[in-house]
Amino acid sequence: MESRCSSSADSRLTARGLVSVNATPICARVESYEAGEKKCISDVRRTFCLFVTFDLLFITLLWIIELNLKGGIEKQLDIEVLHYNYRDSFFDIFLLAVFRFATLILAYAVCKLRHWWAIAITTAVSCAFLIVKVILSKLLSQGAFGYLLPIISFVLAWIETWLLDFKVLPQENEDENRYLSIVGASERAPLMGPGPLSDGQFYSPPESVADSDEELDDKHDPEKGLIQQVT
């Protein structure tokens, strides 16, 4: 009887152990996902923010090169910034890059926005401003940079839109759905584990051969059995 009880208890502990082993990797994945969400932004969002920073730095570099080619940075800064002229200056294209950088970093890195409205605003403003500037200004008569700066600024704005709309947001939605499925699987894990084995599946070992031989001898020899009962 004791062997049956101990075997039944061992089976229940084994079943619980299997359930806990199955649930442990799922819980670990859930905890790692939550820790990653609390500590930093996702990899695709970080790549997007790096590209936005590259946009600002690249436009700045091109503008500085343009200032040097025209006769020196100090002289051209005085002409294009202090005596700003919409038709001749590239300073507003640099400010447009600063506007895109500040808006997108604030929305998608600081506030961690998960919507496209911020990138839609920056792209729409950039496209409208550049088209109007190319039509009304005299940039096309100022050499290669008159073509280069507006075109590069236009292309970078649309690449940022493509990255966010087709890479960042879909990837983060997919990660969130996977996280929810993992949480649901972890909640259902105890129900999926094997149940405890019943006591009816266990049996006691057969009696020893020595005891059975003595009982047979007692049956064949009545006197010996009587003597053992008297003693």
Image (spheres, helix red, strand yellow):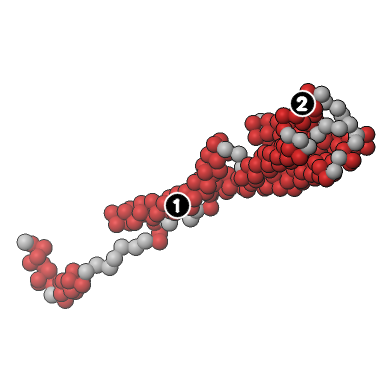
Separation of marks 1 and 2 at Cα, in angstroms: 71 Å
User: What residue is at 58 percent from the left and 47 percent from the top?
Assistant: 182
Q: Mark 1 points at which residue?
A: 21
Q: Is residue 33 above or below residue 97?
A: below
Q: In which quarter of the image is the N terminus?
A: bottom left
Q: Which of 186 and 79 is in front in this view?
A: 79
Q: Position of residue 108 (x, y in %)?
A: 68, 35
Q: Position of residue 2 (x, y in %)?
A: 28, 54
Question: Dot 2 lies on which element?
Answer: helix
Question: Dot 1 lies on which element?
Answer: helix
Tell me, yes or no, if residue 105 can be seen here. yes
Q: Quadrant of residue 118?
A: top right
Tell me the number on the disc at residue 78: 2
Tell me the number on the disc at residue 83: none
Q: Answer with mark 1 or mark 2, whichever residue precedes in sequence.
A: 1
The amino acid at mark 2 is Asp
Residue furthest right as drawn: 135
Please report contact status of discs 1 and 2: CB closer than 8 Å, yes or no. no
Residue furthest front as drawn: 71
